[in-house]
Amino acid sequence: MAVQNFQVVHDFAPGEALRGATVAIGNFDGVHRGHKAVIAAALARGRAPGKRSAALTFEPHPRAFFNPDEPLFRLTPEAAKLRLLAATGLDGAIVLTFNAELAKLSAEDFVQRVLVDRFAISGAAIGFNFHFGANRAGSPDFLQAQGKQHGFTVDIVPPLLDGGRPVSSGPIRAALAAGRLDDAAEFLSYPWFVSGTVIHGDKRGRELGFPTANLRLDPACALRHGIYAVRTAIAGRRCDGVANFGRRPMFDTGAVLLEIFLFDFTGDLYGADIDVAFVAWLRDEAMFASAEDLMRQMKEDSRLAREALTRAGDAFPPI
């Protein structure tokens, strides 16, 4: 259940809303089941009367800071991550800008300046492999010792395993890159989704009888190109559909685009903000001998997508 007044504090901005909270610390890309185990530990500490719990996270992702020329497939950019964190029941989130100044801060200074002086935390919850501070010198054991020194609790959460597999962001990215949506959703606990603003396309779908809402995704998005059954949310309304993510080899093989055909929908969506959850993989992109063959395949894709979405019930991200 999301907290109605979810507070977001950036860096050292004024505001005491989250001082004294128990904080779950991490990057939280995807807010997957492993992350939720850490969040649950913070929530458990924050249930006492007068206590609060929050996430402490970093933007941009530290990997993007240290390797700016290496594309990073983000499962959830900042806005999506905050929406998912709000849905966990936390009271808020602290977002620290990961820049050169923060990167060179020693582990001791991070504890003193950020956790103690700025936010006066009453507790921290971290994953078993969380490291922080310059050169990643701050280990879970170090933070636990610092907690005893400064008077805050530290819960170290063991790895979460699913069938012997550790639940982490890397395998989720790999599953999406391979089109294995079920594996990704199993680790996430929800269908992976993207958000964006509908842009104008080339209107070719409309000419074929399949008008589409088009989104330009982050160039680093490594989702497998192909055809998907999708569920969307537009201004609070849920709509099922079928989508093509890729370069449209039948026509221009141009810039990568997400094109969504919404079932039983009429209206102008240009400029609208939309969430798109990927529920089932259908097939790879393909070339066809004619536009008529393509239209027949699109009708079949729509049929298969409807069946997949019916099987999926009301599956949708908790946002």
Image (spheres, helix red, strand yellow):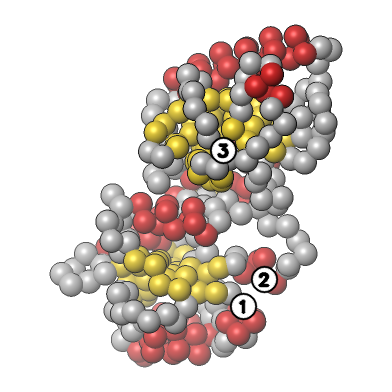
The residue to which callout 2 is attached is 65
Instruction: Name the residue located 33 percent from the left edge and 84 percent from the top edge.
Output: 120
Q: In the rendered image, which quarter is residue 246 located in?
A: top right
Circle nearer the N terminus (2, 1):
2
Residue 7's x, y, as percent? 34, 66
Query: Viewer-nearest of labels 3 and 2?
Result: 3
Mark 2 crowd level (few <14, some 14–19, many ≥20, 10 Å Cα): some
Residues marked 1 and 3 touching at CB (< 8 Å): no
In the rendered structure, the answer to whether residue 293 lies left or right of residue 318 reads right
In the rendered structure, the answer to whether residue 144 lies left or right of residue 50 reads right
As shown in the figure, which amino acid type bears the numbered disc 3? Tyr
Circle nearer the N terminus (3, 2):
2
Q: How many labels does the image show?
A: 3
Secondary-structure class at tag 2: helix
Q: In this rendering, is residue 253 above or below 218?
A: above
Circle nearer the N terminus (1, 3):
1
Secondary-structure class at tag 3: loop
| Residue 155 shows in the view | no
Q: In this rendering, is residue 117 above or below 309?
A: below
The residue to which callout 3 is attached is 270
Mark 3 crowd level (few <14, some 14–19, many ≥20, 10 Å Cα): few
The residue to which callout 1 is attached is 99
